[in-house]
């Protein structure tokens, strides 16, 4: 059997080369397709950071300075100041070339056109200097960056009304199972609501990729083959749920063989998700996920997230394993790596994972209470309260 890490290693997709130009605001949560290099120095001039008075600092600075002029933000100026003089200046305005300090209003007494320092001023105070934030030709955002709101000021200042990003990946969703019904459809006691189709589409949306819904398919080998083949022609990634195990009506493997996909991984030493299939047809990766909803959710997070991160050269889609202390004892066999839904909180000395009542991979109620999965290594049999383990946020 394959370990989780070997399964991740087996995923070596082609990079997506197609890009598109989107409006700045539409670029949020899209992956940058170019390096952004600054074409400016910023600030573009020495800028006052306080409302106050600009002056030239001297060792023998007079106690009082005469107010010579006033400068507002956005005003072009070539005021020359002389010894014994200062200029009234507002935050954001260009500091006159021959001034090197700004004293804020609150630190002076203003009277009869003069200021008097309440305490000795500091040389160089309250000025943001030309180019101190950003230098011309500096690499500011790297290709593969997931664009976030905190980067928008920078892009706007550099003149990007639109941004070149990688196209969204097309991710196909197929759910299979004779027992499945849609939300609100008449149910028999043995029916199961096709919750995973919604959950997968939600996960794809959370990653801001394109979800293509191929619907719910009965356990019919021909229909599964046909839908799978169709999906691989249009998608970068396809996730098909149910039927990845070894039961009489588990047709995913058979369908993958029939459409000429190459099966890279058949089972993985992990729980949930042991009967997970990873396959490839042309440039499309296919994940055959076990039908249990928590398996499907974690398999998507672990493997589809990894494929997206590799296809778009953007690490943010991949799980980020962090360390936490566990607040409970955990026992398992040493045959598989466990991914356990848990609630992680930041406490005094780091992250702590708290126990959630969990009855196995069908327990989507437990999943709804979790914000993370604990990763308990294959070889571990007992993890004691207080031990450190890895986890990732979902
Ligand atoms: N002989 C073996 N039997 C099983 C193995 C094994 O290795 N050898 N693995 C077990 C594990 S672990 C899992 S997980 C399941 C996975 O089986 P399938 O992928 O074939 O999934 P199903 O049997 O179709 O479904 C399992 C369970 O999940 C429900 N389900 C399915 N699809 C959905 C959906 N879209 N939304 C909500 N719920 C869904 C389904 O009704 C079943 O209850 O195999 C074990 N057996
Ligand atoms: O490994 Mo299964 O995926 O227990 O539910």
Image: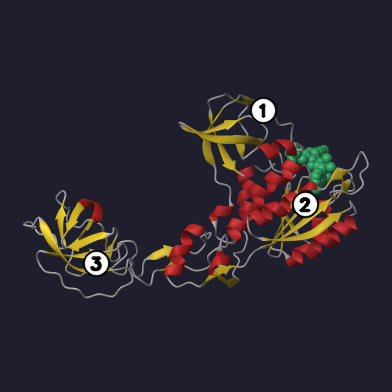
Q: Identify the residue at image location x=93%, y=42%.
A: 188
Determine whether the beta carbon of the residue marked 2 sits less than 8 angstroms from the nearest atom of ligand 1: yes
Query: Is 97 located above or below residue 387 in the figure?
Result: below
Seen in the image, is 135 located left or right of residue 362?
A: left
Mark 3, Cα crowd under 10 Å, few <14 / some 14-19 / many 20+, is: many
User: Secondary structure under badge 1?
Assistant: loop
Q: Which residue is mark 1?
A: 332
Of labels 1 and 2, earlier in sequence is 2
Mark 2–mark 3 distance (CA, rounded to whole Å): 60 Å
Q: Residue 107: image x %, image y %?
A: 21, 51
**From where the camera sits, is residue 351 visible?**
yes
Q: Which residue is mark 2?
A: 197
Q: Which of the pair 168/270 is nearer the observer?
A: 168
Quarter placement of the C terminus: top right
Indicate left or right for 89 with 65 as reference.
right
Looking at the image, which is closer to me, 260 or 72? Answer: 72
Name the element at disc 2: helix
Q: Indicate whether 234 appears above or below 150.
A: below
Residue 95 badge: 3
- Residue lying at 55% horizontally and 35% vertically, measured from the top left: 345
């Amino acid at each position: 059997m394959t370990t989780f890490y070997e399964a991740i290693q087996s995923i070596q997709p082609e990079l997506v080369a197609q890009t598109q130009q989107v409006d700045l605001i539409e670029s949020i949560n899209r992956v940058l397709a170019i390096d952004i290099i600054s074409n400016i120095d910023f600030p573009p001039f020495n800028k006052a950071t306080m409302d106050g008075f600009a002056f030239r600092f001297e060792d023998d600075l007079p106690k009082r300075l005469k107010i010579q002029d006033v400068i507002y933000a956005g005003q072009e100026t070539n005021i020359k100041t002389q010894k014994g003089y200062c200029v009234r200046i507002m935050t954001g305005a260009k500091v006159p070339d021959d001034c090197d300090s700004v004293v804020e209003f609150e630190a002076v007494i203003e009277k009869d056109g003069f200021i008097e320092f309440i305490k000795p001023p500091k040389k160089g105070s309250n000025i943001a200097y030309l180019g101190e934030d950003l230098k011309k030709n500096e690499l500011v955002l790297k290709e593969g960056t997931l664009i976030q709101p905190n980067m928008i000021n920078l892009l706007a200042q550099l003149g990007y009304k639109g941004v070149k990003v990688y196209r969204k990946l097309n991710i196909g969703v197929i759910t299979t199972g004779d027992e499945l019904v849609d939300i609100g459809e008449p149910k028999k006691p043995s029916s199961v609501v096709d919750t995973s189709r919604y959950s997968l589409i939600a996960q794809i949306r959370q990653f801001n990729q394109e979800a293509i819904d191929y619907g719910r398919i009965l356990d019919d080998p021909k229909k599964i083959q046909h839908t799978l083949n169709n999906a691989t022609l249009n998608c970068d990634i396809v996730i098909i749920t149910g039927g990845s195990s070894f039961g009489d009506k588990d047709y995913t493997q058979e369908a993958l063989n029939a459409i000429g996909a190459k099966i890279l991984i058949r089972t993985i030493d992990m729980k949930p998700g042991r009967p997970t299939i990873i396959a490839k047809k042309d440039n499309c990766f296919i994940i055959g996920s076990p039908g249990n909803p928590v398996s499907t959710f974690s398999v998507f997070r672990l493997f589809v997230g990894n494929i997206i991160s590799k296809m778009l050269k953007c690490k943010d889609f991949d799980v980020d394993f962090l360390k936490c202390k566990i607040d409970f004892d955990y026992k398992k066999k040493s045959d598989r790596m466990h991914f356990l839904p848990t609630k992680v909180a930041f406490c005094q000395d780091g992250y702590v994972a708290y126990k959630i009542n969990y009855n196995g991979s069908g327990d989507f109620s437990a999943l709804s209470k979790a914000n993370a999965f604990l990763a308990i290594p294959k070889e571990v049999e007992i993890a004691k309260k207080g031990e450190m383990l890895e986890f990732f946020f979902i």
